[in-house]
Image (tube, helix red, strand yellow):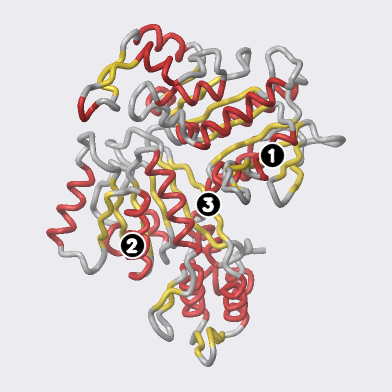
Amino acid sequence: MRQRNHAVFFEPRLGKTKVGIDWSNILALKGEVKRCVILAPSIALPVWQDELVKHCTLHAHVEDYTHEWSLPGGAGAPQIQYFLAGREATFRRTRDSTGTLLPGKKEKILEDWRPDAIILDESHEYKRPGGRSSQDGWHLIRRLRKSDKHTPARPYVLLLTGTPSAKGWRDLFAQYRLMDDTILGTSASDFDEEYCVYGSGPRKFTVIRYKNLPRLQRKIAAHCTTATAEQVGLSGILNFQVIPYQLPPQIRRLYDELSEDFVATLSGDEAITAANAGVKRLRLLQITSGFITDPDRRQIHSVEERAAKDWLALVCQQGENIVVYCRFTAEVDAIARVSRAAGFQAVVIDGRTHHQDRTKAIRAFQDQRKGGKPKALVFQYQAGSRAIELTAAAEVLFTSLPDGWVDFWQALNRVRGPNQHRPVRITALCATGTVDYSVLRALRAKEDVHRSLLKDPTRFLSGLPPL
């Protein structure tokens, strides 16, 4: 709090988001911060929305590039304003008629908003000194600080990441330059000359060792706070989060039509039918996943697939292994494909997998030796929720949810146990306003899903909580 500009380097799932919210709230109470920008990967913005509702203690006004809303916390004018900005969209540039790159419109919107503080979530995404996001973010902060008359100059910057220096100390230079360019300087070449030793020949662009390391470590440590799961006693603790996605308008109409009746027109004279409430729920889950088996096996939308890819890419950047659970065979294949595209070494385990191949894949997944790509196991529930240990991962992704609480609970416990030394994050992809939310709510409350459905079919299928 005294430094204002600071870095929070916690292992994943230790509460960096709450630290950022508390930091901005305290500075608001001190009268130093009225407007705070949260720059995060677009896929993480819904998580920030939920965490602001949970942890922001002040009356706040929140907006993004298209919407605005208020958070309760007291009468009168908002004590703090937040702007939620996706990193990818903010620093997306355009070209004029001559081909010259121009600053993006959204970057200009942020600059005109005049923030007093900026929270850079997943700051390791800015680690390349010459990268566009790193350069644009640094120049944006410099322009804002040059026009500010306070001491220290605003906006203050808080870095949040669980993987600050995955490939070495040089990864921290560009991040610290964003936060405070007086700590490690502004020139990557000067930093390299002072602290890096490069190889020769084929390795001339590779840092082979560091020099003056005690001095560099002192500078870094003086402006950051670190924590591990073991230090804070959170090993094996489960944390749940939901990442919502919107169904395309045509698919939304199809979903609503089927949820009200037992038949819906897909296209032309094709129809999706359900014989009873249970089958209807299954058909609606197929629609939200994007893969239907009635009248034929095909993909009708890719929104869930894209949301999964965005989240998987973020987890892969953090160097984390992941366990993914899917319901339908076509969904398993699609998620395995996007896992590989995101950078994972992905293996499918479902009913088609031979027993020996399954055992070999799980043993390889549990191998803790360093090096290589992060690993992903993509399961169909029946093949991956019993009698195995998957503690090499502390990330679990449900792209669709199982029918019963036993399968759900067994899947959760594959990544827990005495060999799990980190907190575990459970992420569920859910289509907004659909049965996905009702199924998740019932599973977490240990309810029987089918019994909950029959109590009030309309509310259940619309994703609403029971009365």
User: In which quadrant is the C terminus drawn?
Assistant: bottom right
Q: Nearer the viewer, residue 158 or 138?
A: 138
Residue at image coords 51%, 68%: 288
| Amino acid marked by disc 1 | Lys
User: In which quadrant is the N terminus drawn?
Assistant: top right
| Circle nearer the viewer, 3 or 1 | 1
| Amino acid marked by disc 3 | Val
Label 3 – label 1 distance at C-alpha: 31 Å
Q: Can residue 19 be seen?
A: no
Give how far across and how far down residue 214 sits, in percent: 36, 7
- 101 horizontally vs 66: left or right: left
Q: Is mark 1 on a helix, strand or loop?
A: helix
- 280 horizontally vs 22: left or right: left
Q: Which of marks 3 and 1 is nearer the N terminus?
A: 1
What label does residue 242 carry, if any?
Answer: 3
Instruction: State the residue position of label 1.
Output: 108
* Number of disc labels: 3
- 226 horizontally vs 67: left or right: left
Give how far across and how far down residue 389 sits, in percent: 25, 47
Label 3 – label 2 distance at C-alpha: 19 Å
Q: What element carries label 3?
A: strand
Q: Residue lying at the far front in this picture: please name it.
A: 98
Give how far across and how far down residue 66 sits, in percent: 71, 52
Residue at image coords 51%, 37%: 132
Instruction: State the residue position of label 2.
Output: 381
Relative to residue 376, is residue 48 depicted above or below? Answer: above
Q: Can residue 264 be seen?
A: yes
